[in-house]
């Protein structure tokens, strides 16, 4: 049975704002408190989805979360009507309201870790929602994420869903942003690559000194167990603490992989030779051949990689066997990065083409093309079992554009988050979206 990779991009939510909430994310912090444009952000994301659909790639949509999160605010002591909760939070704790209004679920690479059926013990596609407990504004996402994923991948014959790991620092899990799968073919057993920043229990692993290491080894191991992965199909690697301290808060800021190709910076991992050797050996036993593309620091400095988000890119397999690299427009603006990419595309290697997309609204908040998508490898039967409402088509694209234009503001500042009308606008939009995407009642306000 044939299999293909499908990308599910997060729709940018109506409360997209620059709260500067993500310590360790250079772009997020540097654009803190500036006004955002939610409408433009959503349109930019949809434009990328449609462009890839037109190129023949399978594309889906993942709905945003309800924001502000009234339940979270109530749990922190704010009371009254929903409007009063927003008003009190804006008056008494505006930074907390900003956290509970974050549209960070748009970065669906953090939504979950996904293992295809070819790798799992029970032959189903497994999803584990990420607890994201390093940051409060993201730690409140996983219950809603689980509901939406369950509505998208509902057939228990094909899909298995696991709740987030315990909400403790020892099991910090950031989802697919620290997970890559290598394989000869999407439908064949592959090697799942888990990258962690620290160990919670083993003091032998060095840690960064400036910024937090968000993913733990113990979380990665737990996900592998939950998904029923064999030791022969798993490789663990530690992220280089030095690059975390330079703003590489997830592995997908310094490396991206697809098929048999690993595109990575020279300084991405600790003990790179061992990591690459283990990946090579285990993939070879699965019938594949690892093709690492290491970018030398002399060609692209880590700082340039972080600012351009060179590695926060999508690496996509085309029908002719070559690969397309989807990068943010910021790569074109960086002379060293663009010079490297032009040479890469002309080198005759597996990456034959580079396409740059304008994702400025997302980039200014710290997320590039790779952050915006969750990859799911599906065979024909599994693909047929996906909720058809979330599969992007030209007609759905036009409907979503009209939905965005009808419901989204074109400017949102910090003071606007305290407007109870924004909550009403968000709920009205999401209520209509669940009808468009055929999700059912997945939001708390629809069931209370």
Image: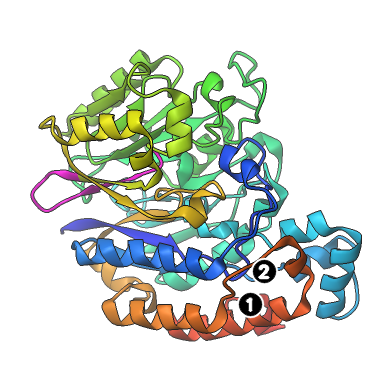
Majority secondary structure of the magenta segment? Answer: loop
Q: Secondary structure at mark 1?
A: helix
- Quickly name the residue at label 2: 67
- Quickly name the residue at label 1: 426
- x, y percentage for residue 247? 56, 31
Q: Earlier in the sequence, mark 2 or mark 1?
A: 2
Q: Residue at position x 59%, y 56% from top?
A: 104
> In the image, is residue 426 above or below residue 218?
below
Q: Residue at position x 63%, y 35% from top?
A: 24
Tell me the quarter of the picture where residue 394 sits.
bottom left
Q: How is the image coloured?
A: rainbow
Which image quadrant: the C terminus?
bottom right
Q: Residue at position x 81%, y 78% from top?
A: 82
- x, y percentage for residue 167? 70, 46
**Label pair 2/1, CB-CB below 8 angstroms:** yes
Which image quadrant: the N terminus?
bottom left
Region of the chain picked out in magenta, as a range: 311-323
Q: What is the distance, in whole Å, between disc 2 and disc 1 at their CAs?
A: 7 Å
């Amino acid at each position: 049975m044939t299999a293909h990779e499908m990308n599910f991009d997060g729709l940018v939510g109506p409360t997209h704002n620059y709260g500067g909430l993500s310590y360790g994310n250079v772009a997020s912090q540097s654009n803190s408190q500036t006004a955002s444009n939610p409408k433009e952000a959503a349109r930019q994301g949809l434009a990328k989805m449609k462009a890839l659909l037109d190129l023949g790639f399978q594309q889906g949509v993942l709905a945003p979360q309800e924001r502000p999160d009234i339940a979270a605010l109530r749990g922190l002591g704010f009371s009254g009507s929903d409007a009063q909760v927003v008003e009190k939070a804006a008056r008494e704790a505006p930074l907390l309201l900003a956290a509970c209004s974050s549209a960070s679920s748009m970065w669906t690479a953090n939504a979950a870790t996904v293992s295809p059926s070819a790798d799992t013990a029970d032959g189903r596609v497994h999803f584990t929602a990420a607890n994201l407990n390093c940051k409060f504004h993201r730690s409140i996402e996983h219950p809603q994420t689980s509901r939406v994923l369950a509505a998208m991948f509902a057939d228990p014959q094909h899909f298995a869903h696991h709740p987030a790991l315990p909400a403790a620092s020892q099991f910090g899990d950031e989802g697919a942003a620290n997970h890559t799968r290598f394989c000869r073919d999407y439908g064949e057993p592959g090697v799942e690559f888990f990258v962690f920043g620290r160990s919670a229990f083993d003091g032998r692993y060095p840690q960064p000194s400036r910024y937090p290491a968000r993913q733990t080894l113990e979380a990665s191991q737990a996900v592998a167990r939950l998904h029923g992965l064999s030791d022969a199909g798993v490789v663990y690697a530690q992220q280089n603490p030095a690059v975390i301290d330079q703003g590489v808060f997830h592995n997908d800021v310094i490396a991206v992989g697809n098929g048999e190709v690993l595109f990575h910076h020279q300084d991405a991992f600790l003990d790179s030779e061992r990591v690459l050797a283990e990946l090579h050996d285990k993939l070879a036993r699965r019938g594949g051949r690892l093709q690492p593309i290491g970018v030398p620091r002399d060609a692209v400095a880590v700082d340039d990689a972080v600012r351009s988000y060179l590695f926060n890119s999508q690496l996509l397999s085309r029908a002719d066997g070559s690969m397309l690299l989807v990068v943010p427009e910021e790569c074109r603006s960086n002379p060293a990065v663009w010079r490297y990419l032009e040479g890469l595309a002309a080198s005759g290697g597996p990456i034959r083409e580079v396409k740059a997309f304008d994702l400025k609204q997302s980039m200014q908040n710290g997320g590039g093309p790779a952050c915006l998508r969750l990859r799911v490898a599906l065979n024909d039967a599994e693909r047929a079992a996906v909720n058809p409402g979330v599969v992007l088509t030209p007609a759905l694209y036009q409907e979503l554009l009209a939905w965005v234009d009808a419901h989204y503001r074109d400017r949102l500042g910090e003071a606007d988050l305290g407007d109870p009308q924004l909550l009403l606008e968000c709920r009205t939009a999401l209520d209509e979206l669940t009808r468009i995407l055929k999700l059912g009642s997945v939001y708390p306000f629809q069931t209370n």
